[in-house]
Amino acid sequence: MRIRHIFLMLLAISAPAAAAIAQQTDQPTLATTPQQELRALTRKWDEAIIKKDLESLHQILAQDYSFADIPRSSYLALMVEMPDIEYSSYERNIREIRIYGDASIVFSHTSVEGKYPGVSFSTTFNSMDIWIRQNGQWKAVATMNDDMKVEPPRDKVQVGPR
């Protein structure tokens, strides 16, 4: 009789904990580190370009965002609002993320494919995105790209033009 009583007490104590654990595993997992958040935002940004999703781009890009020296409004017009350009693929392969408190630099190798106007194009380049956390949310504030070049061997230093 005593064993049955102990068993029922253990069952009563553990049932709420088991229900809480089950409830936690049913919830979607959220990005928990800045690196995870920035990877997810970068992917969302790439998808927004392909889909020409201005609403998502407005959420991702800070009001003062600039692409090199091109302001946000011109960037949006070039990337999304031009009806003649179609992106079939836009993907940043993130190589490194550096976090500096509420600032971050994301280094990527970027591949883009599409048509403009009706002529296929494909390009690959290096990319650096600067992010700032504003009011608890990461916003892209600047991007700089350069041509993808073959990397020199690590034991040699390239000086001057190739």
Image: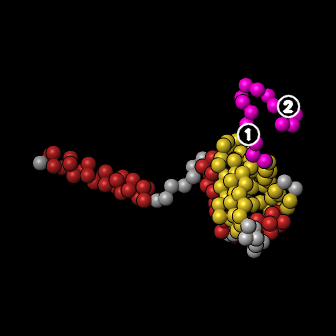
SS of the residue under disc 2 = loop
Give me the residue at 65% from left, 47% from top: 94
Residue 150's disc number: 1
Residue 135's disc number: none
Q: Going by the picture, which residue comes out furthest to the front? A: 119
Give me the residue at 73% from left, 39% from top: 150
Q: Quadrant of the C terminus?
A: top right
Point out the tag, 2 or 1, that comes first from the N-terminus.
Answer: 1
Q: Give the residues drawn in magenta, as a range.
A: 147-162
- Please tell me in which quadrant of the rendered image residue 112 appears: bottom right
Give me the residue at 65% from left, 55% from top: 91
- Whole-number angstrom distance, CA of label 2 to CA of label 1: 14 Å
Magenta stretch: dominant SS?
Answer: loop
Could you classify mark 2 by the number of other residues whose Cα lies within 10 Å: few (under 14), some (14-19), or many (20 or more)? Answer: few
Name the residue tied to disc 2: 159
Image coordinates for residue 153, horizontal then vertical, percent: 72, 30
- The answer to whether residue 153 is magenta is yes
- Pick the residue in front: 111 or 34: 111
